Amino acid sequence: MPQALKKSLPHLILLIYVAAVLLPFAFVILSSLKGSNIDIAERPFGLPETWVFDNYVTAWVKAKINVYFFNSVYLSVTSSAAGVLLAAACAFALTRMKFRRVSSWVYQFVLLGMLIPGNVLFIAQYILVKDLGILNTHWSLFLPYTAGALPLGVLLIAAFMRAIPAELEEAAVMDGLSAIGLFARIIVPITLPALVTVFIVNFLGAWNEYLLANFFISKDALRTLPTGMVGFRDAFQTNYALICTGIVYSVLPVLVLYAFLQKQIIEGVTAGSIKG
């Protein structure tokens, strides 16, 4: 194999992969701006004959995408933030405090949660949520989302915290910081890249979750975007432009979030893998 071809082959494979990922999204964006199903069917990747930007207004108001969108943002942000805070506190206790034998067992117990598929717990979660009297409320999703994100969050943050020099902790204690002060003023700022990474992972999981949201929430005003999109599809099944518009709304926040925080995400993943 020629040397030039050998060097360009990985780039060619990467370009093919990028094209495979972006082409469906390009089809969705173009279709969301078209005015008829005929235009979508005859020229799936062609520019619209008539640019119909009103599709986004129609979907936002008429199909109540605004309600589902707010519910998804609210639940994803709050559950992700709570998951990061709890995971950071747990990782701090397990890696920096002096009860190593117990912490090792607790750490292994927490990580066992990663081995249990989420769908296996569905019936038990449903019964628990029903007995707590929070069925058909946002609490029925907030609590499982937060708890389900803890094992991976503890794993990533603990790997980062183990790399923090003990001398830094000792100097902070000598300056009079308590355990809470050490955690809030020293550990959290240092582990910020890992915290951002865990937040993004938690956010994506909560944003795309469908099973619990579909069975725990029946009120239309409380539905999240994935479950609301199902009714959106049924109500506008002959208008593929509006369906594609709803898909764009569901993907856009994730793209924006990653665009602004990609540096922190990469730092968190690489630092945790190298130092941990």
Image (cartoon, helix red, strand yellow):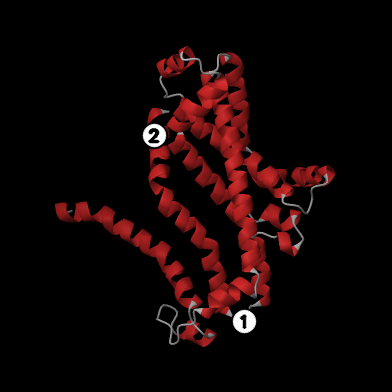
x and y percentages locating residue 24 in the rendered image: 45, 68
Which residue: 46% across, 24% down? 162
Q: How many circles with numbers are drawn on the protein?
A: 2
Q: CA distance from mark 1 to mark 2?
A: 49 Å
The tag on residue 238 is 1
Amino acid type, callout 2: Ala
Query: In terms of secondary structure, where does tag 2 sit?
Result: helix
Q: Answer with left or right where residue 30 lies relative to residue 241.
A: left
Q: Answer with the quarter of the image where residue 114 lies.
A: top right
Neighbours of disc 2 within 10 Å: few (<14), some (14-19), many (20+): some
Q: Answer with the quarter of the image where residue 62 lies.
A: bottom right
- Mark 1 or mark 2, earlier in chain: 1
Query: In terms of secondary structure, where does tag 1 sit?
Result: loop
Question: Please, is residue 156 above or below residue 257 in the view?
Answer: above
Question: Please, is residue 109 above or below residue 115 in the view?
Answer: above
x and y percentages locating residue 258 in the rendered image: 44, 52
Amino acid type, callout 1: Thr
Badge 1 vs badge 2, beta-carbon distance below 8 Å: no
Disc 2 target residue: 271
Which residue: 61% across, 61% down? 69
x and y percentages locating residue 15 in the rendered image: 31, 60
x and y percentages locating residue 81 in the rendered image: 58, 42
